[in-house]
Each structure stands twice: as structure tokens, then as C-alpha cells.
Amino acid sequence: MQYVSTRGEAPALGFSDAVLAGLARDGGLYVPREWPQFSAAEIRAMRGLPYADLAIRVLTPFLGGEIAAPVFERLVREAYATFRHQAVCPLVQTGPNTFILELFHGPTLAFKDVAMQLLARLMDHVLAERGQRATIVGATSGDTGGAAIDAFAGRDRTDIFVLFPHGRVSPVQQRQMTTSTAANVQALAIEGNFDDCQGLLKDMFNDHAFRDSVSLSGVNSINWARIMAQIVYYFSSALSLGAPDRPVSFTVPTGNFGDIFAGYAAKKMGLPIERLIVATNDNDILARTFATGEYRTKGVFATTSPSMDIQVSSNFERLLFEASDRNAETVRRYMAGLKQSGAFTIETAEMARMRSEFDAGRADMDEVAATIRSTLETSNYLLDPHTAAAVHVAAGKVGSAVPMVVLGTAHPAKFPAAVEAACGVSPALPAWLGSLMSADEKYTVLPSDLKMVEDYVSRHSRAAR
Ligand SMILES: Cc1ncc(COP(=O)(O)O)c(C=O)c1O
Ligand SMILES: N[C@@H](CCOP(=O)(O)O)C(=O)O
């Protein structure tokens, strides 16, 4: 299996190199050269498999034989042993034909753990085999950072630097990043928003001298392995609802478009997914794009679902590549427009292709609060604000006989203030995270300035040459 860049100007790479590279050297994102296929019979044979076994079955074709089977099996089993629910990602029914796929039973209570726990082990394995070290820089609007720090803390072959928007993450999210005592962890509070953090990250990757000098690697969903690992729970949930003999639709709280792109990948691999519905909060660039065909950024607005406060949605580039029949020149043109004027207009035929698979909607903060309240009243189920945005959007789309699965991307206890304001209930952190809110914090505040951040990373990275 080879991985190609969406911008077509970087060399194709094998699995291990693509994982270590993160962003392609031409600024593009890696995607598999072709989608592995499972027949209906092969999917049927996956029914009833424990989550780790399913992950091994679904993900092995992506490895291109580069990770020995017994090693991969061990890494997968270790990754999912960190989850506190036996099913790893359980499915809970909340209405006649609606379900929440709970993705928040990992160490940091967010869906990011599902991929991050595996990615850290994969990277460690590849680096150890090659006798190398890497510097990992991640950008977060709140959840990726904590999940990455948990997964990489104490690993000798990597130093991890997480850029988070100063003052714009929830207190629980912040502490999950700032209370780590591991020597290889650095939390950097950037004076800006998430798009600034992600912009700095991409600029670091595109500064090849810096990139090479610190052996830069990435753990955001620009890294293919993040998307890959997220494909598995589309299979697990669809299988338990009757796949491949019954189609399923998914509504996904969306920001960087990584999670929903994993659903698209699952569909390309043969899973019968009817609709993939993008749910945004007030930062509704993707909902507007699906409505108008124009991707146009405007300022980021701070909401009660901070992890979705994003304008530049990285993985949308992967969908543009697909919708343009993998035309890298078209993708480069769109991305140049985004860089120059903050906008681009998508060709009609490409938009039609996207609309044939995806739908989109938005939930503003009042709608999110009302959904948290009403779901508690009618289903006795406490939503976090991100999942609530998706439940609101899904409610406007349900209606067919096809089951609707909403991805539950975070535990409500990560956002107690917003949840309590909405419904009067303040969700408590699980006991095993009890000391989080009293532990000492350690972080460095930096301006949103490329040179200053690069300088900080170079000075603190053990991989720096
Ligand atoms: C809780 C939560 N929900 C939804 C999202 C959006 O997911 P994605 O960026 O993959 O679209 C995020 C951040 O990524 C998140 O942390
Ligand atoms: N919402 C994310 C933003 C980064 O997303 P990623 O999936 O690309 O890592 C977060 O919580 O940090």
C-alpha cells in the first residue's frame, strides 16, 4: 500500500514513512493510493468480533505488510486495553431509530483517544526499529492535545509539544495538557485561536529546514494513521445495526473533518453507509460550503463546543481530492485560493459528488443547550455540547427507516459549565481523573509567531540537530 499526497508534488510513501511524515512535503495530506475493499461476505464475517480483533481485520490492509502481524496485533490490543468500557466504543439507543456511538471511554474522555493510543504505539515501534527520535508538534482546540499528551507521555523516542489557544479551551481540557509531569511533554498556550495554532503547525512542516532539523512529526488528523484508526468504529457500530445487510447513516460533530472523513473511507471500503451528515456549531463554514459551494472563512467565534471552533478544516482537502477524481492540480488551485483570499469556489460537478454522499447542518449555542436539556428529559441521557450539536442536526434529518448513529465525541464532564448551564446537572469527572483539577499546572505562553515557536521547540527537543 502506497500513500499519495493530495497536492501531487511529494513522493508517494509506504505506511511507516507516511505515519512519521504527518504532512506531505508539498503541504498536502496523504491518502491511500487505493481504498482497500471488503465484500459483503467479508463484512458479515466481522460480526461479533471484539473491538481489537475488528480493528486488526479492518486496518491490516492499510499497513502494506510493513508491520509484522504479531506486532500489530500486540499494539492494537495494548491500545484498546486503555479503554474503560469492555466494548471500547459502545452504541447506546436514545430514540426509536437513533443511537449515540460513545467514543469517550478512553483515558482523556474524548474520541481522539481511539486513534491516538494506537498512533503513539505505532510511532514508537517504527522509531525503535529505525533507531530514530522524533519531535511531535500538535495543534489543538482542546481534545487532541490532551489525548496526544496522554498517549506519548514518557515515551523515550519522542518529545511532544502541544499548541493550544490560550484561554479558549475548557478547564478540564487545559489541565489534561498542563498537569503532565512527563519530561518529554511541553504545553504551549498560543496567543490566538485554534486556526492560528494549526497555521503555525503547518508552517513548521512547510519550513523544510526546521522540519528536518528536529525530525518533525505530527499527530493531528493530518496524519493518515489518525483517520485510519477512526474507520474502525464506523464498522463496529454499523455491524451491530445489521451491516452489511442494512444501511446506516452517521451524523458527526465536525471541525477538522477528520472524523467524518474516516466515515467516508469506511464507505469506500464497502460499508453500506447511506448518508454522512456534517454537524457544525456557530462556526458553520462547512455547513455553508455544502449549501453554497463556496468555502469562505470568516472569524472564529468562541462557543460552548470549543473543540469545533475551527474555520480552516484540514481534512476537507482530502475530500476535495476525492471529489475532483484525485486531481491534485485542482486541489492546489483551491488551496492557493484559500491562502490568498481565504476562500475558493468548488466546481459544480465536484459539489454534486460531495452532496451525493454528505449532508450538513449547524446548531447554534441556544440549540445546543436546548438539545442537552431535551435529551436529558426525554432519553435520560446527558450529552456533551459537541455531541449535542450533532444530535440537533441529526433530528432535522432523521425520517427514513435507516438507523441514525450520532458520534458521541466527548464525555460531558469535560465541559461541566456548559452542561450545567444548559440543564442544571453538573457532570462529575470519573473517579480515576479525580486529582486532575487540583494538580499543579505547567505551560508556556507564546505569541502566535512562527520563529518564536520554532525556536522554543528547537531548544527543547532532544531530536534537534
Ligand atoms: C469533542 C469533539 N467533537 C468533535 C470534534 C471535531 O472532529 P473533527 O476535527 O475530526 O472534525 C472535535 C475535534 O476534533 C472534538 O474534540
Ligand atoms: N478539535 C480538535 C482540533 C484538532 O483536530 P485533529 O483531529 O486534526 O487533531 C481538537 O480537539 O484539538
Image (tube, rainbow, N blue to C red):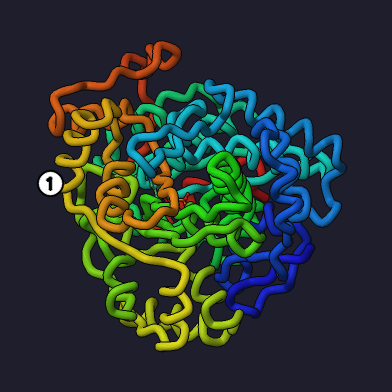
Residue at 59% x, 74% y: name it.
Answer: 6
- Within 8 Å of ligand 1, the CB of disc 1? no
Residue 6 horizontal side relative to residue 345, left or right: right
Residue at 76% x, 66% y: name it.
Answer: 2
Percent position of residue 362, x then y: 25, 58
Residue at 51% x, 82% y: name it.
Answer: 332
Percent position of residue 401, x then y: 41, 53
In the image, residue 427 above or below residue 341: above
In the image, residue 20 above or below residue 439: below
What number of labels is visible? 1
- The answer to whether residue 149 is visible is yes
Q: Residues within 10 Å of mark 1 (few under 14, many from 20)?
A: few
Residue 85 horizontal side relative to residue 452, left or right: right
- The answer to whether residue 136 is visible is no
Q: Amino acid at mark 1?
A: Asp
Which is nearer the eye, 220 or 112?
112
Q: In which quadrant of the rendered view does residue 254 lie? A: bottom left
Q: Quadrant of the N terminus?
A: bottom right
Percent position of residue 17, x then y: 74, 57
Determine the secondary structure under disc 1.
helix
Residue 289 horizontal side relative to residue 107, left or right: left
Residue carrying label 1: 366
Which is nearer the eye, 69 or 36?
36
In the image, residue 363 above or below residue 7: above
Percent position of residue 396, x then y: 25, 56
Residue 157 horizontal side relative to residue 409, left or right: right
Residue at 62% x, 64% y: name it.
Answer: 268
